[in-house]
Image: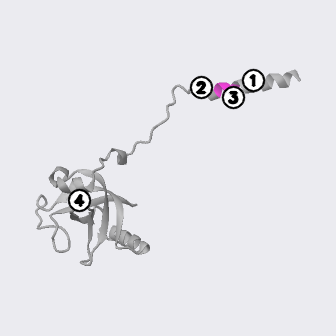
Amino acid sequence: MKRWKLVSSLLSAFILAASTMGQDSVQPKTLESNETKIPVVEFCDLMADKERYVGKLIRTTVVAEYLITMEYVLHTKCGEKKPRVSLGFKDDIESQTEALGSEMYRQRNHSLTITATGVLQSAKAKGLAGFGHYQWSKFQFEIYSYSVQ
């Protein structure tokens, strides 16, 4: 019986020591992704001061819409105005637009509110006449990633 108490006491002491060892040196890691460092810009602010944001990675919430001209645009209501820019994708535009179109079809809606991370591009800076099907937009928001709201 004494032997059992001794083994039990030693085992308890070992478990207690093992559980408290190194607690001061182990700090919980905060998950910090690049996504949290990207500035959030209201779409109306982006449209009001386009030159300020050209070429900068930002996140914005906006309406993505598929038009009868067979192109995607981004817009939102800003007071009485509803500014629009052409929508582009950084990588694999075909599969990205197909995924966006599939989600619109699934929801039975030709527009979706999305939160998009991307870069505003200027046609002038790229030496282009414009963006979009008929080159109507002087700016394009190139999406790197998005989520549907």
Q: Of tags 4 and 1, which is closer to the observer?
A: 4
Q: Which residue is mark 2?
A: 21
Helix, strand or loop at mark 2 = loop
Label 4 to label 2: alpha-carbon separation: 60 Å
Q: Is residue 133 left or right of residue 94?
A: left
Label 3 to label 2: alpha-carbon separation: 10 Å
Label 1 to label 2: alpha-carbon separation: 16 Å
Q: Is residue 103 left or right of residue 15?
A: left
Q: Of tags 3 and 4, which is closer to the observer?
A: 4
Label 3 to label 4: alpha-carbon separation: 65 Å
Q: Inspect the magenta stretch and tell me whether residue 147 lies in it.
A: no
Between 96 and 18, which is closer to the camera in this rendering?
A: 96
- Determine the image quadrant of residue 82: bottom left
User: Which amino acid does the dot numbered 1 rest on?
Assistant: Leu
Residue 15 marker: 3
Helix, strand or loop at mark 1 = helix
Q: Which residue is mark 4?
A: 79
Which residue in the rendered view is the most extreme toward the bottom?
68
Question: What is the crowding at mark 1: few (fewer than 14 residues within 10 Å), some, or many (at least 20)?
Answer: few
Q: Position of residue 122 (x, y in %)?
A: 15, 59
User: Which amino acid does the dot numbered 2 rest on?
Assistant: Met
User: Which amino acid does the dot numbered 3 rest on?
Assistant: Ile
Helix, strand or loop at mark 3 = helix
| Quarter of the picture holding the C terminus | bottom left
First along the sequence among labels 3 and 4: 3
- Point out the stretch of residues depicted in magenta: 14-18
First along the sequence among labels 1 and 2: 1
**Residue 54 higher or lower than 137, as above or below:** above
Q: Residue at x 17, y 50 (%)?
A: 52
